[in-house]
Image (cartoon, coloured by chain):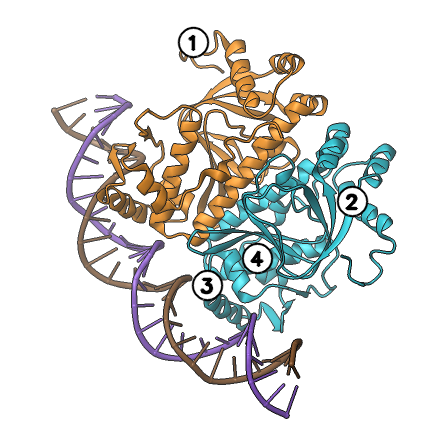
Chain colours: A cyan, B orange, C brown, D purple
DNA sequence: GTCTCGCTCAAACATAGGTTAGACGCGCAT
DNA sequence: ATGCGCGTCTAACCTATGTTTGAGCGAGAC
């Protein structure tokens, strides 16, 4: 299934292990045994096309995916076709931690861009969690941080106006990308979402997203060239969004 | 600190243990050793007055509380004073699982009614989680279910209109209370929230909550006597809310 | 008993954001 | 090179929900 894409599949075991270990090591101090256990995980690298469903509501997931490259999102659908995007997943995020211990998915996961993930069978992950308290802790932290982001999004959608919401989304993107060294030095980055998807993440219509995006540009807070977003004035954008990155728990390490 | 309230503190060890074990046993099969370990937890019963803050954003929590009786909620505040209620906590819910592995709280917790909780020191809880995979799994499930509820609320606030939102909140309350046998047989229950609090949970203003509540009553979906909500036509209410209890994962047991 | 106080309820008016409907432009398949 | 499809952008119009304000009312304090 692997398309001829860069060299990822050539040095696969090393790359995947490195990514996983690097991620978990930001949260806890891994012992040598932990590292060996992670390296021994039977994970499979997979590249998935844009828009492909990676998981559907109601399904019983068998694998947990760790994002190596690209973006995905979680969405929930209303019976009458409304959509809400409830999470954006970036390199370094785990996609199915919720399904580690829940048997039936309560939402869909869809590839936002072409995406490469490492898939770990759920039983193997449960095994390692039962055996290594350090690794279990690191995964707990990841899951709890995602819940914290959900809470901030609830505040965002429930109590902020369109301009603040959008600015907040842009700030969060910027902060998360910066935290994983994925944004350019000047703070600009590529936002791989359509305006409709942004609307679905913010509880807005695409035409209103368009209006507000223009307003942010006119106000001199951002620049846009195609989908490349440039943060012109980080402080102003942060203030416009009332953005405070505490909820991302970026510095949370081994408690 | 215990006020002279009923007899709760007299038979405290048995009551608390029973509640905790009963809760965890709905998720996993507890071994005899697990039960002993839970019984040995150094927990403290505490009753807290309505409106008291149990935890504040930015604080480092030292204890994890398990609700025995009464209600609480999580809230997030905007710098300019807007509030969003992001969770309602009922008997049988854990209040600080997020802070089991995160050092700084990202939200406030406030007592909605007079509430009685069992407080477990975080280190003791971490200890038991490291030692018993069963108990760890049960707590994982609790935390993951709460994240799932966050997601449903995001859909609710982001993509449903006021009537559906409110109907959805009422359905969730009803379903959760029923699941812990706390509602009356006829499906009516006491909703201990003011209309302003409902608004804050739904991203609405109190006056609009009032309008919609009236409309739901006029439509014959509910009755109200003071704060007692009667569900007149469960099916109609469920349909009006597009309510599907899957996201509550009520039947999720030992995976 | 009556005085607060907090909550509910209501009406009149204001607006942020939704809806509908196209035009435009760019990349890609043929 | 042409046409198609998807995303962006705009404008005109509409409505669900917010805002402001104040009256009613029940429960507890004294």
Q: Which residue is under mark 2?
A: A43
Disc 1 to disc 4: CB gap under 8 Å:
no
* Chain name for mark 1: B
* Chain name for mark 2: A
Q: Which element type, helix, strand or loop, lies under badge 3? A: loop
Q: Which residue is under mark 1?
A: B7
Disc 3 to disc 2: CB gap under 8 Å:
no
User: What's the distance in space between the residues labelled 3 and 1, CA to CA?
Assistant: 55 Å
Q: Which residue is under mark 3?
A: A205
Please name which of the two marks, 3 or 2, marks the residue nearer to the observer.
2
Q: Which element type, helix, strand or loop, lies under badge 4? A: helix
User: What's the distance in space between the residues labelled 2 and 1, CA to CA?
Assistant: 54 Å
**In the rendered view, does B19 fall on the left or right side of A141?**
left
Q: Which element type, helix, strand or loop, lies under badge 1? A: loop
Other residues around mark 4 within 10 Å, as few (<14) / some (14–19) / many (≥20) = some
Q: Which residue does the image show at 55% across and 60% down from the upper left?
A: A167
Q: Position of residue A153 (x, y in %)?
A: 53, 49
Q: Which residue is under mark 4?
A: A169
Of the pair B12 and A111, the residue shown nearer to us: A111
In the rendered image, residues at marks 3 and 2 fall on the same chain: yes
Which badge, 4 or 2, comes first in the chain's sequence?
2
């Amino acid at each position: 299934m692997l398309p001829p894409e860069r060299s990822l599949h050539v040095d696969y075991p090393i790359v995947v292990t490195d990514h996983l270990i690097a991620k978990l090591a930001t949260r806890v101090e891994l012992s040598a045994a932990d590292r060996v256990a992670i390296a021994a995980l039977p994970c499979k690298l997979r590249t998935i096309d844009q828009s492909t469903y990676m998981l559907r509501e109601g399904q019983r997931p068998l694998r947990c995916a760790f994002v190596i490259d690209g973006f995905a999102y979680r969405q929930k659908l209303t019976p009458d076709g409304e959509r809400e995007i409830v999470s954006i997943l970036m390199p370094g995020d785990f996609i199915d931690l919720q399904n580690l211990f829940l048997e039936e998915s309560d939402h869909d996961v869809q590839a936002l861009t072409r995406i490469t993930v490492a898939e770990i069978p759920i039983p193997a992950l449960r095994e390692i969690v039962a055996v290594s308290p350090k690794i279990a802790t690191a995964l707990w932290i990841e899951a709890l941080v995602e819940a914290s982001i959900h809470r901030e999004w609830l505040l965002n959608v429930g109590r902020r106006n369109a301009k603040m919401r959008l600015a907040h989304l842009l700030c969060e993107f910027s902060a998360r990308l910066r935290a994983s060294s994925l944004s350019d030095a000047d703070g600009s980055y590529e936002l791989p979402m359509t305006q409709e998807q942004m609307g679905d993440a913010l509880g807005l219509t695409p035409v209103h997203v368009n209006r507000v995006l223009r307003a942010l540009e006119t106000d001199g807070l951002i620049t846009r060239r195609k989908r490349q977003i440039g943060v012109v004035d980080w402080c102003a954008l942060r203030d416009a969004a009332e953005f405070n990155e505490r909820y991302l728990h970026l510095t949370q390490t081994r408690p």
